[in-house]
Image (cartoon, rainbow, N blue to C red):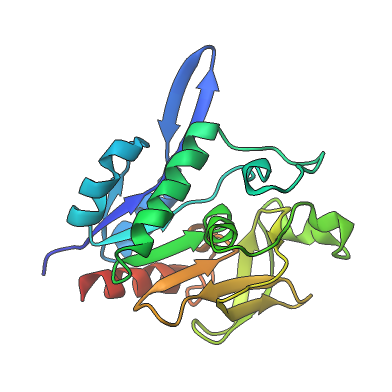
Amino acid sequence: MRRPLIGLTPSIDVRDGRTIVRVNATYLEMLVEAGGAPVILTPDAALIGDYVARLDGFVLTGGPDIDTRPFGVPLHEKAEIMDPRRQAFDFALLRALEREPAKATLGICLGMQEMGVSAGCPLIQHMHDVVKDADRHGNDNTHAVTSTLFGDGAAASWHHQALADAGRFEVIARSDDGVIEGIRDASRPYYVGVQWHPERTKDRTLGLGVLRSLVEAASR
């Protein structure tokens, strides 16, 4: 069977005056293992129509923080915001996917936060302000996650921000300290966000299993 084409949003870095567009290899390797054919997207909003028309599914990858100021929310002093070109591209892609609700879409870490903020969900900009021992969610530390969609297990995380409320989304996962770890739009075939990093999670239920669920949805 043909492998579904899965587009991945890239990070944009500037080093020594040069712009670098990149995706961590762990995303690509696990998507291939899950049965998909990963495609790294050029972050040009003019291409989004072609991407949505031709690709079978999408992954909004992890990365730095959202600049909340365009959404009317002051920026936290601890925020380390992404390149504005990436933010513009990612949110334009989410708007386009709203018009194509059948496209399988997975948001990972930052990607889940973008899904939420795009839909009006409030963001905890620095979890240390409200979550006890928030460091356990960083540096690829593992912690327990309970999920109604994927099952329970130990997930690897690297984030200091999280959704304060899921808004119109269904909460499908939480960590053992109550942080929202997964959301989905139940009105769409597959529109899911996870706060952990499945591509770096050894537990197959919350690791490879998440990417396989996306690939299966994109194959329908």
Tell me: 71 left or right of 78: left
Residue 145 appears in the figure: no
Q: Which quadrant of the view contains residue 170? A: bottom right
**Residue 144 makes an appearance in the image:** yes
Q: Farthest left residue? A: 1
Query: With 38 as the anchor, is 194 left or right in this view?
Result: right
Estimate the x, y position of residue 55 in percent, counting from the top left: 22, 56
**x, y (%) of residue 188?**
37, 77
Residue 114, given in percent of the width and then of the height, sits at 55, 55
Residue lying farthest to the top in this orientation:
17
What is the quadrant of the N terminus in the image?
A: bottom left
Q: In front: 144, or 179?
A: 179
The structure residue drawn at horizontal position 29% and vertical position 66%, both measured from the top left corner, is 103
Using the image, determine if residue 7 lies above or below residue 24.
Answer: below
Q: In this view, does 123 lie above or below 22?
A: below
Residue 219 coordinates in the image, percent (x, y): 21, 71
In this view, the residue in front, 140 or 220, is: 220
Task: Give the mark count.
Answer: 0
- Quadrant of the frame with the C terminus: bottom left
Single out the residue that lies furthest toward the front: 72
Q: At x 47% / y 76%, what residue is drawn?
A: 185
On screen, residue 28 versus residue 170, left or right, reads left
Q: Please tell me which residue is depicted at 58% across the width and 73% down the height of the picture.
A: 182
Q: Can you tell which quarter of the image residue 42 is in? A: top left
Residue for point 51% across, 63% down: 198
